[in-house]
Image: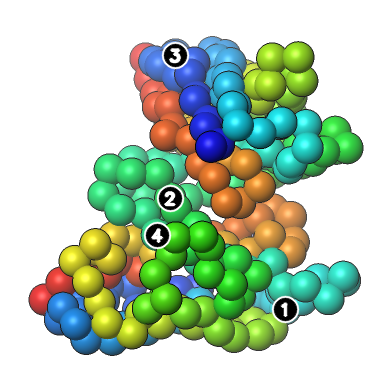
Amino acid sequence: DVVMTQSPLSLPVTLGQPASMSCRSSQSLVSSDGNTYFYWFLQRPGQSPRRLIYKVSNRDSGVPDRFSGSGSGTDFTLEISRVEAEDVGVYYCLQSTHWPWTFGQGTKLEIK
Amino acid sequence: EAQLVESGGGLVQPGGSLRLSCVASGFTVSNYPMSWARQVPGKGLEWVSLINPGGRTYYKDSVKGRFTISSDNSKNTLYLQMSSLTAEDTAVFYCVKGTDFWGQGTLVTVSS
């Protein structure tokens, strides 16, 4: 299975400040069709996961533009330009290039 | 607007069986890859099984031979038949459309 390793596991951030988190895969996520099936999700307390970013860098509908995704191959980053209170929760990365699809262990973002 | 409503979770004894259902509205289940993912309360996410629009099915190794994913196009419903359940299967099970839309989850507890 592809192992997805997120860092840091805990991310305390001051409101209005930027935040950055990383996800590294144990093998390349570039598919035979040329796409990279890599995603970012946010799970707020008590809620189901919500997809924020698809195929590395594309924001889902309704996701604020303060969220941005980047990366390639095996190394990926999610950045938040200015953290707001509603951004609190656990961020998960997911790859669906290889079966079984696998998640990272999560980065918990909290407000300092 | 898409909606996914899971049901069928509950308390079951080790070795028992359970069938989860996921009724979809706002889209046609047979047109999308549909999945079940699970989350042990307080822990990370795990992709369990997938059925693609062509009907091909995929399973995580730990559930292969015990779980069966299926869909009923006439009812626009996704199912997960689970058997030989163990305590390690205790989790909230989510129905997922593609990777972009998740249901609210249904809790499965395996305990004597």
Quarter-of-image position of residue B104:
top left
Label 1 is placed on what type of residue? Answer: Ser
> Mark 2: few, some, or many residues within 10 Å (few <14, many ≥20)?
many
User: Mark 3 and 2 residues: CB-CB less than 8 Å, in contact?
Assistant: no
Q: In this orientation, does residue A21 appear?
A: no
Q: Nearer the viewer, residue A76 or B45?
A: A76
Q: Residue at x 65, y 70 (%)?
A: A55
At 19% across and 66% down in the image, what residue appears?
A85
Please determine if labels 4 and 3 lie on a single subunit: no
The residue that label 2 is drawn on is A49
- Identify the amino acid type marked 4: Leu
The residue that appears at 65% across and 21% down in the rendered structure is B77
| Disc assigned to residue A48 | none
Regarding residue A96, the answer to whether it shows in the image is: yes
Q: Disc 4 sits on a residue from what chain?
A: A
Q: Residue furthest left?
A: A112
Q: Which residue is labeled 3 in the image?
A: B13
Q: Position of residue B19 (x, y in %)?
A: 58, 16
Q: Marks 4 and 3: which is nearer the front?
A: 4
Q: Which residue is mark 4?
A: A42
Secondary structure at badge 2 equals: loop
Number of numbered discs: 4
Give the image location of residue A87, x and y in percent.
28, 66
Cα distance in 3D space between marks 4 and 2: 6 Å
* Mark carried by residue A28: 1
Label 2 chain ID:
A
Q: Quadrant of residue B69?
A: top right
Judged left or right of residue B25, residue B49 is right
User: Which label's residue is closer to the chain start, 2 or 1?
Assistant: 1
Q: Are marks 1 and 4 on the same chain?
A: yes
Residue at image position (73%, 42%) is B33
